[in-house]
């Protein structure tokens, strides 16, 4: 007896603790099922002799106990084996079946309550009680059949628990049929009866408890998988968002470059035509050379928007023509020095980069014969192209849209290249540009 109560108490405590953490309906139901089994056994073992009951009273308690157990058993089947996924019709049938079990249990209790001992010991009473226990056995068999459809550990452990429940009820049915519910049995001692029933019940509860352990583990694994999928989905969405943002930035850069070209071309053409007009009257040969250089500049400007990169050699040829036009306007107030190693001339840069930097230097600094502006284009041993000029800022405010340097930086970011360095100090303004090596020159 002490072994039985100790084992059932341990099962109840473990499930009660699990229910206190999970707060799920299924854990609460099984904890209640264990408590009902423990309470019924404790009453018969500890209080039956102190509280005299008729044989009908014993049977009423037994019938109520098994009826509640079976009602919880049906609900566990519904929760464990996806009853919520059943069709509406099947769900209704299941609920009507549970209600029918409650009604049939109450009918048996009422019959035991209102009839005398001769009736329930008669054939009629015996058949009525036998039918009730056959119903309970049938419910256990139905649980085995439903659980058998699930081939995992949940289904297998539930089947084993249901088998021992069925054996328990089958034993009671056979016992009642042979002995007409004697209390105590003159053939089999009450202690032996308890050992048989309680042993089966302990094994039954252990299997059901193990079934719920596997069920909770399956739920935890499913939630972990779902969280992993959600995390992967969020990561994918974040990557797609970043890709979209990068694409928008690239489009923004392209729009800015086209806008800059649209602003530079008319403005530069207007100044160039003024310079050309003055040259035509003073020096026709220089005017002819100016027109040739101007055509070279605009030919390059038109081609620049068609490609993301151009060779440094082509950009230097263009800047020579561009500088010639600027030199015509500013005279001795402007000088350009190019010191680029031949090994670096095949390097690539975004088109119009040098034009933007040279124009930026001329735009923001004084370029007079008395205060000449010196622009220098050179390379270093690290493979960087540096464009620098002496600082002599104009005294009046210069209207600037601020997209020159930002466009160059955005172009390098678009190409996933190191960002240019912008440095100022020692009276000079410097921009260091990383040269991009053509394919095949990475060795």
Image (spheres, grey):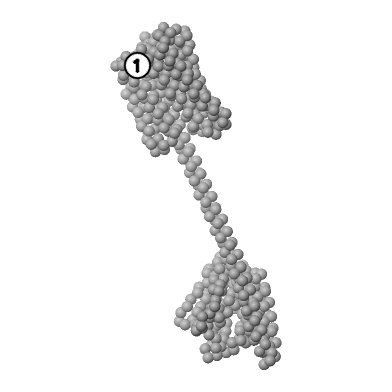
> Quadrant location of the C terminus?
bottom right
Please give the name of the residue rendered at 46% of the width and 25% of the height, measured from the top-left corner. Answer: 71
Q: Is residue 272 above or below residue 197?
A: below
What is the x, y in percent for residue 190?
A: 35, 14
> Quadrant location of the N terminus?
top left
Q: Is residue 38 above or below residue 377?
A: above
| Total numbered circles | 1
Residue at the far left in the pictured view: 50
Q: Quadrant of residue 331?
A: bottom right
Helix, strand or loop at label 1? It is helix
What is the x, y in percent for residue 76?
A: 47, 29
Look at the image and tell me whether residue 19 can be seen. Answer: yes
Q: Which residue is under mark 1?
A: 191
Please give the name of the residue rendered at 49% of the width and 15% of the height, measured from the top-left corner. Answer: 131
Please give the name of the residue rendered at 67% of the width and 78% of the height, measured from the top-left corner. Answer: 298
Q: Is residue 325 left or right of residue 123?
A: right
Please give the name of the residue rendered at 59% of the width and 69% of the height, measured from the top-left corner. Answer: 256
Q: Is residue 331 left or right of residue 57?
A: right
Q: Residue 393 or 353: which is nearer the viewer? A: 393
Q: Residue 217 or 332: which is nearer the viewer? A: 332
Q: Is residue 322 left or right of residue 45?
A: right
């Amino acid at each position: 007896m002490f072994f039985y109560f100790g084992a059932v108490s341990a099962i109840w405590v473990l499930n009660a603790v699990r229910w206190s953490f999970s707060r799920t309906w299924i854990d609460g139901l099984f904890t209640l099922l264990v408590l009902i089994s423990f309470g019924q056994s404790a009453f018969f073992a500890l209080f039956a002799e102190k509280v005299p009951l008729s044989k009908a009273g014993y049977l009423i308690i037994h019938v109520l106990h098994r009826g509640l157990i079976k009602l919880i058993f049906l609900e566990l089947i519904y929760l464990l084996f996806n009853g919520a996924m059943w069709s509406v019709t099947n769900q209704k049938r299941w609920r009507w079946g549970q209600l029918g079990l409650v009604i049939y249990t109450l009918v048996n209790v009422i019959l035991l309550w209102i009839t005398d001992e001769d009736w329930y010991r008669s054939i009629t009473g015996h058949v009525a009680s036998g039918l009730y226990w056959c119903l309970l056995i049938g419910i256990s068999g139905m649980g085995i059949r439903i659980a058998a459809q699930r081939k995992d550990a949940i289904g297998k452990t539930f089947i084993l628990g249901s088998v021992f429940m069925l054996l328990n009820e089958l034993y009671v049915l056979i016992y009642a049929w042979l002995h007409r519910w004697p209390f105590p049995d003159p053939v089999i001692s009450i202690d032996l009866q308890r050992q048989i029933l309680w042993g089966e019940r302990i094994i039954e509860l252990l299997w059901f408890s193990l079934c719920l352990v596997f069920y909770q583990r399956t739920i935890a694994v499913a939630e972990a998988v779902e969280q992993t999928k959600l995390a992967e989905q969020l990561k994918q969405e974040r990557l797609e968002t970043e890709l979209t943002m990068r694409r928008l930035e690239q489009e923004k850069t392209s729009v800015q470059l086209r806008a800059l070209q649209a602003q530079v071309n008319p403005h530069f053409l207007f100044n160039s035509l003024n310079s050309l007009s003055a040259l035509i009257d003073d020096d026709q040969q220089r005017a002819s050379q100016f027109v040739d250089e101007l055509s070279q500049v605009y030919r390059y400007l038109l081609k620049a928007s068609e490609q993301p990169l151009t060779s440094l050699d082509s950009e230097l040829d263009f800047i020579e023509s561009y500088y010639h036009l600027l030199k015509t306007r500013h005279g001795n107030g402007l000088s350009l020095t190019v010191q680029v190693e031949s090994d670096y001339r095949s390097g690539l840069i975004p088109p119009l980069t040098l034009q933007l930097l040279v124009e930026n230097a001329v735009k923001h600094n004084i370029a007079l014969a008395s205060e000449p502006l010196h622009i220098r284009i050179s390379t270093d041993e690290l493979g960087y192209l540096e464009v620098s000029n002496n600082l002599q800022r104009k005294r009046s405010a210069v209207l600037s849209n601020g997209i020159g340097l930002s466009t160059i930086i955005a172009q390098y970011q678009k190409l996933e290249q190191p960002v240019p360095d912008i440095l100022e100090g020692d009276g000079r303004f410097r921009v260091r540009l990383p040269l991009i090596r053509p394919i095949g020159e990475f060795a």
